[in-house]
Amino acid sequence: MSPESNIYAARVSALRTLMCDNNWDAVIISGSDPHCSEYPAPRWKQVEWLSGFTGETGDIVLTREHAGLWTDTRYFIQANKQLEGTGIELHKTRIPEQVLIPEWLASQAFSGKNIVNIALDGLCQSVSDIQALKSHFTDDREVRIIDVPDMLSRLWLDRPGVPDTPIFTLEDKYAGESSDSKIEWLRHFIKSKGCDAMLICALDEIAWMLNIRANDIEYNPFAISYLIVSEDDVKWFVRENYDDIGIALSESTGRLFINPEGINYHLYSILDKNNLVTGSSPIALRKAIKNEVELKGMKDIHIPDGIAMEKFLFWLDEKLNNAEEPDEWEASEQLGKYRAEATGYLGNSFETISAFGEGAALPHYCTPKVNAPKIRKDGLYLCDSGGQYLNGTTDITRTVPTGRCTQLEMEDYTLVLKGHIDLEMAVFPKGTAGCQIDYAARSPLWKHLRNYGHGTGHGVGHCLGVHEGPQEIRQNFNSQPLLAGMVVTDEPGIYREGCHGVRHENMLLCKELQTNEFGTWMGFEPLTLCHFDTRPIIRDLLSMDEIQWLNDYNKKVRETLSPLLPTKIAEWLAEKTKAI
Amino acid sequence: MSPESNIYAARVSALRTLMCDNNWDAVIISGSDPHCSEYPAPRWKQVEWLSGFTGETGDIVLTREHAGLWTDTRYFIQANKQLEGTGIELHKTRIPEQVLIPEWLASQAFSGKNIVNIALDGLCQSVSDIQALKSHFTDDREVRIIDVPDMLSRLWLDRPGVPDTPIFTLEDKYAGESSDSKIEWLRHFIKSKGCDAMLICALDEIAWMLNIRANDIEYNPFAISYLIVSEDDVKWFVRENYDDIGIALSESTGRLFINPEGINYHLYSILDKNNLVTGSSPIALRKAIKNEVELKGMKDIHIPDGIAMEKFLFWLDEKLNNAEEPDEWEASEQLGKYRAEATGYLGNSFETISAFGEGAALPHYCTPKVNAPKIRKDGLYLCDSGGQYLNGTTDITRTVPTGRCTQLEMEDYTLVLKGHIDLEMAVFPKGTAGCQIDYAARSPLWKHLRNYGHGTGHGVGHCLGVHEGPQEIRQNFNSQPLLAGMVVTDEPGIYREGCHGVRHENMLLCKELQTNEFGTWMGFEPLTLCHFDTRPIIRDLLSMDEIQWLNDYNKKVRETLSPLLPTKIAEWLAEKTKAI
């Protein structure tokens, strides 16, 4: 197939014509939305529309001579496949020899050019992206940014509109604090910064502030909107007045507080820089520290979520015992059905990863709807899934044997479980950040010269994004301490290309244990309720403490869930959770 | 005693007169020297001369109404004692409610003043100190810095001169690389930065570059000097032309590379800012990665160093067995004598910490020469010491029982040893920084709700400073990876005020272990050779792996040192190193 006959090649060609007609030297198409969201709504899946590439991160740069997609290690195989025939070349990031977009534009594409005109949709570009771009053009050269909001709409004729799913109030019995109270608190903060108002662009922060939820973005119960909180007003730019934000900002007088990491370049350009105070958003931290009601919700919801998981694992066991081999997609659908039985279920919290064998070795495997691989006997099946509920959000990974396992599968299974348990059992002084305890999960793997390329844990929202900051557990130097009331995941793994993948994930609540002469001590309590399969465990690789923890945990799962499960499944669970 | 009758109060008074005569609003006296050294020579012990305070860090600020000393947690007790009668007040740092000098000057001492004249000795003040000071005075206010080089010489009539101990060449058989070769390498670096020359102020970097050593600073074999390396010249400003550096810098034309962290404010003021390129010094990193000859030296020297330690511990045991109670000073002198028996011994690498019982609980205990406490029976004795030798530098801490120990002493002893061993056994991927494995040493203590307030490990120079960067093992977010050829200490501890202190320290060599599909793997090899006393160990607190490590290590110490020890001591060591 020649590039020209490819739908994406045709789109690239149309965009290049637009570029040439306007005398732009380059066009950047970003993979983000106007709210710097992790997952954009269909309207902003611009990279996918232009290139067919469906990875979670990717940006496209077009010049007269070149079309390139920049994406990271996780998506190299997928990008190579999806870009075939488009004429778009893959530029690899997160590798030592990477050349990122700003450097590529300044030093390769236009190294000899003094004035470079670059067009982009400022709504979908972060301020820091533009700063990075400008910093690569030294004193004697100039990069001119041409901000064309909604640029692609000129070519993308059936482009979806801004989403407008029904918005509903998350009642105080779920939220635990009224929106009024949150606004009052924020006003104190705004005042303390010497400001008159604050602009909030992050969709999860708006949802949390206003105690509202919607379904504008798949898996994320947000409403696409902006919020300005001032001393005597709360202006919510949503639905019919969504686009009024620009006028409101250009008319605004007083001093405005913004988080420069969360605002798009287009809006930033409008702001009066002399009346701006910048800093990180206080909402992210306050939202991460769950209140008593949110915590109770997060605990409570893990009972139906655990029941769904146990029903699902029982279903899978039955299938395999009957020599049926369900496919990965069928399995993920089945799990979704069990989850949907829970009161307050809103949907999944992210796309279920349902992967057998070598599929599980791909860190961001996407189960195909059609012709999904079978879950076969004698291997490892990995399922990473979660639900959105009115009283919380869940995220759990279980890896289970589908029969006999190889020695290597058992070793990997046990070592990952050992790392998982060691982090659950960690005790650390108040003030410790995630990167200072990440070693707990990795060290058992490292001792056997094994590792994983992703973070160990992320924050989880309360009926909000399944990923939230500011805390995390990974090697990055993020100084945010783990504080009482925060929720994090604990998900080490081992991945062997073409072979198998193992990951074990619980959600943990961070809490204070006690105070002594050495300070205040913190630890974790697991929220997730679903047994760990003991069959692939090599007992000698675990310490007595770790075995004790595992037996206690499985016992707690059995005792909590059994009374709520059908007898047959309760009996099966009793067998599964026998102490080792 | 009234403040006026105190010698230090009189000095403060004289300085205040100088201040008033010159219409200065404040004077800052810093605890550093012109080379930003960790330990200054007597000439620059200005804080001690002015206040009598002998702690390792401390700065004094004088205004018309106030005299204050700023120092950290380690020195509060000592400062309170030493400042008595001086009229100087203690300002506490490294505590949550600290008010540092810039903030204190800007917001407390001179909060209502628009123009503040502050005099200081720019030679002894870092550039970043001055920047911090200026940043605390907002737009509408002005802080005027009056740089008075050698200010105190006007009052300190018997002030010591710039040291001028004999300088000698460290032969290539010790250094492993000629100075010419190092200069050639540095010229490549200078060129790569688009510069014509580099100014080096750090004394250890100069000693390493030129393969020279001297004895200008106690415990540090450096020569007080500056170095400028250019394309065709190497200018060393030392001894009679030490002061010519100012003229040389003011006359210099080409582009100069400097490390802004290592240059004093006075010299920085002279430089042509338009011809300056700043960045971290490449010498620190290259110096930290020992060459083959340096590594062999560092390994070799631990044999005589270990012999000195074993002789010393035997001597102590004998004394205690004979119901003699040597004092802490006598013990430290005895250890020094044993070390001095080694070929190539130059002196101690820092002031020996020789501390029994409660003394050992003070993190920076200083053994008094006169009336030193006795090392008594039935407790824990801690000795932290090291030697400077032509072929290396050592740093070792052993804590030993002087008879029976309490349960708490045994627990602390065992847990610190467990942390020490866990770090020695750590395996980690290439690229890992010290703060990412610091957990290894702390976690066994944390699990028992115990901790220590200092770093876990620091780099060690080769016949240079006993503390060197850029690597370290501590909770700070220092991104420098631990690389093959680097040497670090491993020294966790537990300190119980008024009771006892435990620290176990070895020096470790960082090395590559092997490469597999997950990457390249790194680990440690101990350089230190001295047994760990097994008597206070609570065996149940150690894992089988840890016990195995300990037995193997003690066996290696015995097998390496016994043939070189007097029979009686070799027999004693055989007993001491029996497997547990």
Image (cartoon, coloured by chain):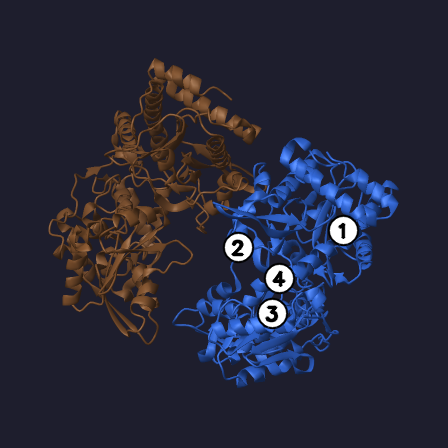
Chain colours: A brown, B blue
Q: Nearer the viewer, residue B476 or B440?
A: B440
Label 4 Cα neighbours within 10 Å, binned few <14 / some 14-19 / many ≥20: some
Q: Which numbered marker is on residue B294? A: none
- Residue A437's place in the image compared with B130, above or below, is above
Type of the residue with mark 2: Pro
**Tag 1's secondary structure?**
helix
Same chain, labels 1 and 3: yes
The earlier-in-sequence mark between 2 and 4 is 4
Q: Position of residue B201 (x, y in %)?
A: 59, 72
Type of the residue with mark 3: Ala
Same chain, labels 1 and 2: yes
The CA distance from mark 2 to mark 4 is 28 Å
Q: Which numbered marker is on residue B57? A: 4
**Tag 4's secondary structure?**
loop
For residue B109, say whether it is visible.
no
Same chain, labels 3 and 4: yes
The CA distance from mark 4 to mark 1 is 31 Å
The earlier-in-sequence mark between 4 and 1 is 4
Q: Nearer the viewer, residue A325 or B481?
A: A325
Same chain, labels 2 and 3: yes
Q: Position of residue A541 (x, y in %)?
A: 55, 31
Where is mark 3, residue-wise? B202
Residue drawn 76% across and 56% down?
B368
Where is mark 2, residue-wise? B481
Residues at discs 3 and 4 in contact (Cβ within 8 Å): no
Same chain, labels 4 and 1: yes
Same chain, labels 2 and 4: yes
- Residue B340's place in the image compared with A111, above or below, is above
Q: Position of residue B138 (x, y in %)?
A: 41, 69
Where is mark 1, residue-wise? B306
The earlier-in-sequence mark between 1 and 3 is 3
Label 1 Cα neighbours within 10 Å, binned few <14 / some 14-19 / many ≥20: many
